[in-house]
């Protein structure tokens, strides 16, 4: 399959998932996504290169609170 189906943006399961940033200690790379509360699985959504990317992620999904980082 050449192209993946894109999930509709702007909505996520607020009861079962929490927004998180996964950061690499070694390289400093940061990826925004959602962590499943029950399984601990992390779903990557977008790469964070600068503060504008983080602002776009928060705006796209309607996130007002501070996003936690996991290393």
Image (cartoon, helix red, strand yellow):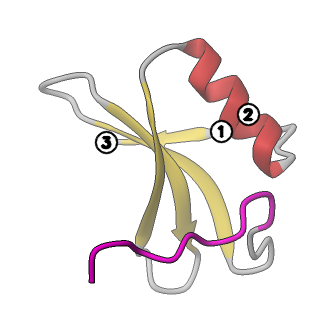
Q: Which mark is residue 16?
A: none
Q: Quadrant of residue 23?
A: top left
Q: Which mark is residue 66?
A: 2
Magenta stretch, residue numbers = 1-11
Q: Are marks 1 and 2 in contact (CB under 8 Å)?
A: yes
| Residue 69: percent from left, percent from top | 48, 39
Compared with 9, 58 (above or below) is above
Taking 33 as reference, is 47 left or right? left
Residue holding disc 3? 71
Distance between the Cα atoms at labels 3 and 2? Answer: 16 Å
Name the element at disc 1.
loop
Compared with 17, 60 (above or below) is above
| Front position in the image: 48 or 2 | 2
Distance between the Cα atoms at labels 1 and 2? Answer: 4 Å
Task: Tell me, yes or no, whether the highlighted magenta stretch contains residue 36.
Answer: no
Q: Residues within 10 Å of mark 3 (few under 14, many from 20)?
A: few
Residue holding disc 1? 67
**Image quadrant where one finds the N terminus:** bottom left
| Residue 51: percent from left, percent from top | 59, 14
Taking 24 as reference, is 13 left or right? right
């Amino acid at each position: 399959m050449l192209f993946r189906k894109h999930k509709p943006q702007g909505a996520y399961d607020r009861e079962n998932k929490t927004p998180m940033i996964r950061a690499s200690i070694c390289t400093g790379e940061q990826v925004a996504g959602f962590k499943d509360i029950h399984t601990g699985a992390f779903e990557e959504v977008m790469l964070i290169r600068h503060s504008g990317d983080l602002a776009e992620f928060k705006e796209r999904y309607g996130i007002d609170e501070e996003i936690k980082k996991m290393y």
